[in-house]
Amino acid sequence: MTTGLPSQTQVIELLGGEFVRAGYEIEDVVIDTRARPPRITVIADGDDALDLDTIATLSRSASALLDGLETIRDPYVLEVSSPGVDRPLTTGRHFHRARGRKVDVELADGSQLAGRVGELRDDAVALVIRDGQDWTVRQVPIADIVKAVVQVEFSPPAQVELELAVGQARRTEAGT
């Protein structure tokens, strides 16, 4: 039995422009035809976090566009969501959006780092890491990163650490 659901590529092509106009990019589309009713999940991300109002707006727009397709014959469930906090950071855009956040990083040489994401420049990310009792900034080429995942924090970071990560980029943007 076929539901006439569009392919992942078709969904991205159909919805991509609408999401970009709203300030978001489609990170992934998952189509589950085994679910009853079938499910289309659109994962979007942007410089601003997806809040519930934005998700509702994007869902309405996406639903209207998908419902306009004559190929869909059966009911389906549409879900628009943001990537989870456990989504690996894989592109410069991901690191840019994670600036100021704590990450665990595995490097190509097998070593591991825990640090706070700072400025992204020339395909390298600045990581603020512990150096004894102090903090230091280490430039890590994105190409050397095998895996990087944002860590959930339950207490605020040290002010010095945060300043090195976020303040450094603000000073650079301001030209100082």
Image (spheres, grey):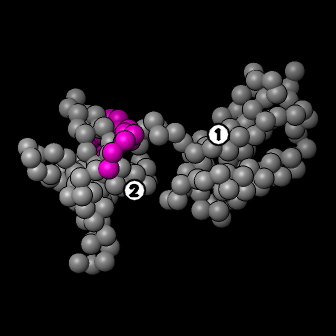
Residue 157: x percent and y percent? 28, 50
Q: Is residue 101 visible?
A: yes
Amino acid type, residue under disc 1 in the picture: Val
Q: Name the residue beneath numbered marker 2.
A: 96
Tell me the residue at 67%/44% (across/down).
Answer: 80
Q: Quadrant of the N terminus?
A: top right
Residue 35: x percent and y percent? 76, 23
Q: Using the image as rendered, state which of residue 26 and residue 114 is in the foreground.
A: 114
Q: Using the image as rendered, state which of residue 76 and residue 29 is in the foreground.
A: 76
Q: In the rendered view, tell whether residue 128 sits above or below residue 87.
A: below
Query: Which residues are the magenta region?
Result: 141-156
Q: Nearer the viewer, mark 1 or mark 2?
A: 2
Q: In the rendered view, tell whether residue 37 sits above or below residue 13.
A: above
Left or right of 164 in this view: 46? right
Q: Using the image as rendered, state which of residue 105 and residue 161 is in the foreground.
A: 161
Tell me the residue at 32%/73% (across/down).
Answer: 173
